[in-house]
Image: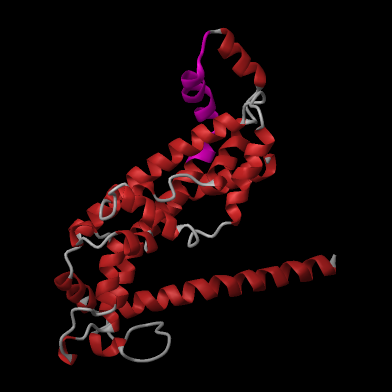
């Protein structure tokens, strides 16, 4: 009994340390963003500003027009997530069919792609998009990571849990594949769909490498690339024009704010989706 209590307390300490390792840097970024320009130059971790100020946000918004980059990011996030969820759903549906020839082999090949780093296929992807004349288009970013093995396997796991009797009754009623997916598979696998969608929203909103490689047209840049130019101070021409840490951290705060709002709303779907999918898998 005493040993169990000791292990539990040790677990609480470890979890508290892990939480602090993530919360403290985030809070320091937030505090720096709301500091004056001179205060933000102070070294170390800032837990409370000497005086609160929105000077950094004013500097940031005067240097960059976020409307077009944010609109581009929104298009890529919404369209890319919809495409990814659709392809993962169809792939999971096919793999969940018991009569599929070579089902195990196909599933194994799909899982094998998890061992391939995304950086390895970046150059072939660039060459393919160039031949398709899709460079400097938002379509290139939407097609990037159009589907993944994780998403397909997760949907397959959910689809395999649907009672065969329900599906057999639907088939006897004349339901074809499209109706089966839309009326039976998707409603029963909604947590899995929401899990994939949530992960994709976060990943595509934070997409950085692909826009950096595939996009050179200023009218097609995404929010993260626009913020990078500000944080690095590319337009700085003198020391008086130098972008302070408060403006840089203001850019970080603005970039993660939508995700901070979005993620708690989707948390229950993420926990339920991954837990049920993992247990049933």
Question: Residue 168 occupies which quadrant of the picture?
Answer: top right
Residue located at (43% from left, 56% from top): 124
Question: Residue 208 occupies which quadrant of the picture?
Answer: bottom left
**In this picture, is 148 found above or below 58?**
above
For the N terminus, which image quadrant?
A: bottom right
**In this picture, is 142 found above or below 191?**
below
Whether residue 161 is visible to the viewer of this picture, yes or no, is: yes
Residue located at (50% from left, 32% from top): 90
| 227 and 59: which is toward the camera | 227
Residue located at (43% from left, 42% from top): 84
Residue 120 relative to residue 253: left or right = right
Looking at this view, name the residue that lies furthest to the top: 173
Question: Residue 64 occupies which quadrant of the picture?
Answer: bottom left
Query: Residue 205 in magenta?
Result: no
Residue 185 percent coordinates (x, y): 54, 27
Q: Which residues are magenta?
A: 174-193
Residue 198 relative to residue 132: left or right = right
For the C terminus, which image quadrant?
A: top right
Residue 166 percent coordinates (x, y): 61, 17
Residue 153 percent coordinates (x, y): 59, 41
Whether residue 34 is visible to the viewer of this picture, yes or no, is: no
């Amino acid at each position: 009994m005493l040993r169990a209590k000791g292990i539990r307390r040790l677990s609480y300490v470890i979890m508290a340390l892990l939480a602090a390792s993530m919360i403290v840097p985030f809070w320091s970024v937030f505090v720096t963003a709301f500091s004056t320009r001179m205060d933000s130059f102070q070294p170390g971790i800032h837990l409370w500003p000497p005086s609160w100020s929105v000077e950094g946000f004013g500097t940031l918004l005067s240097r960059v027009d976020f409307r077009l980059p944010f609109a581009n990011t929104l298009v890529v996030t919404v369209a890319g997530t919809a495409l990814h969820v659709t392809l993962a759903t169809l792939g999971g549906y096919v793999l969940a069919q018991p009569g599929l020839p070579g089902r195990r082999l196909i599933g194994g090949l799909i899982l094998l792609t998890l061992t391939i780093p995304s950086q390895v296929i970046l150059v072939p992807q660039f060459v393919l998009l160039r031949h398709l004349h899709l460079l400097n288009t938002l379509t290139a970013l939407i097609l990037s990571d159009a589907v993944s093995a994780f998403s397909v396997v997760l949907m397959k796991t959910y689809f395999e849990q649907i009672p065969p009797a329900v599906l057999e009754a639907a088939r006897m009623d004349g339901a074809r594949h499209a109706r089966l997916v839309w009326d039976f598979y998707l409603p029963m696998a909604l947590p899995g769909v929401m899990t994939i969608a949530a992960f994709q929203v976060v990943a595509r909103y934070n997409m950085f490498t692909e826009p950096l490689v595939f996009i050179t047209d200023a009218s097609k840049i995404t929010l993260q690339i626009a913020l990078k130019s500000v944080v690095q101070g590319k337009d700085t021409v003198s020391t008086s024009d130098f972008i302070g840490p408060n403006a840089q951290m203001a850019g970080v705060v603005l970039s993660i704010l939508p995700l901070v709002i979005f993620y708690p709303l989707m948390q229950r779907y993420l926990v339920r989706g991954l837990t049920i999918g993992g247990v049933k898998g």
